[in-house]
Image (spheres, grey):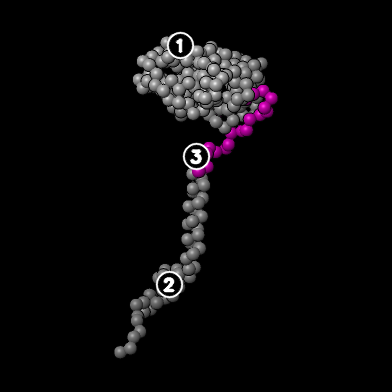
Amino acid sequence: MVLLHVKRGDESQFLLQAPGSTELEELTVQVARVYNGRLKVQRLCSEMEELAEHGIFLPPNMQGLTDDQIEELKLKDEWGEKCVPSGGAVFKKDDIGRRNGQAPNEKMKQVLKKTIEEAKAIISKKQVEAGVCVTMEMVKDALDQLRGAVMIVYPMGLPPYDPIRMEFENKEDLSGTQAGLNVIKESEAQLWWAAKELRRTKKLSDYVGKNEKTKIIAKIQQRGQGAPAREPIISSEEQKQLMLFYHRRQEELKRLEENDDDACLNSPWADNTALKRHFHGVKDIKWRPR
């Protein structure tokens, strides 16, 4: 199995294994699905952290309004009365004005937070350092865990406009957001390796050979964005060590320059008449008055 270290730009994303005989059309779609799936888990974790702190989403026409404005306009949060967390709610006002402030109690909050941490660990970039490959099954498992935690805390479900429910139902609208720019459509995804585009009409082995123990750094890119930057010759850690070595060397040379160049001439080994005086027997004669 060829090991692919998938990156977006210079940032590591995940490891993936594939046979050398894999069609690149299939592999590119697979990499894009895992990449986008990880982004979905990250978005859900971010929103669920807010859910644990401030409760469900307010209706779009009530978001950002003060209590006085809501009362003046006679707006009512009908879903807020239906979607009550298990064990009762604890009021914690959302300063941004996106959520209704009816947060779950401490026990239910811990259920959400623990599940969030577990899901983050599954799709974490630290899996690259640990040598663990991330598959679509692992991404789906993380999504199922998050869905289960929300159902435990909110058995009546979430409002249809809540971004968490929309993510679970694949109805999320990411247009005009930074999150939307990070997503790569499967049909527009490209893989690059060694400054070459891995064309979908070929097989992986056409580029990396038939050695199944090969490891490559593949960069995922949106079509039309051009070739990604090539990998640096040395890693950032190696560059730091190299700079540290040259700094120490420079300091050492600086200290040598500060020393007196003639200081060594007073040393015994620098006396060019020492051998002659040794044979004449006048090596240690000292002149002093009687």
Q: Residue at x 38, y 75 (%)?
A: 278
- Label 3 or label 2, whichever comes before in sequence order: 3
Regarding mark 3 in the picture, which secondary structure is present there? helix
**Local crowd size for mark 2, using a 10 Å CA cut-off: few (<14), some (14–19), many (≥20):** few
Q: Amino acid type of disc 3? A: Glu
- Quarter location, residue 53: top left
Regarding mark 1 in the picture, which secondary structure is present there? helix
Can residue 79 be seen by looking at this rendering?
yes
Q: Where residue 20 sits: x, y (%)?
A: 56, 18
Regarding mark 2 in the picture, which secondary structure is present there? helix
Labels 1 & 3 near each other (Cβ < 8 A): no
Q: Which residue position holds label 1?
A: 82
Along the line of sight, which residue is nearer the eye, 72 or 29?
A: 72
- Label 1 or label 3, whichever comes before in sequence order: 1
Residue 226 part of the magenta-drawn span: yes
Q: CA distance from mark 3 to mark 2?
A: 45 Å
Quadrant occupied by the C terminus = bottom left
Q: Nearer the viewer, mark 2 or mark 1?
A: 1
Q: Where residue 96 sits: x, y (%)?
A: 51, 28
Q: Which stretch is magenta?
A: 215-240
Along the line of sight, which residue is nearer the eye, 163 or 99?
A: 99
Q: Which residue position holds label 3?
A: 237
Q: Amino acid type of disc 2? A: Asn
Q: CA distance from mark 2 to mark 1?
A: 95 Å
Q: Which residue position holds label 2?
A: 266
Labels 2 & 1 near each other (Cβ < 8 A): no
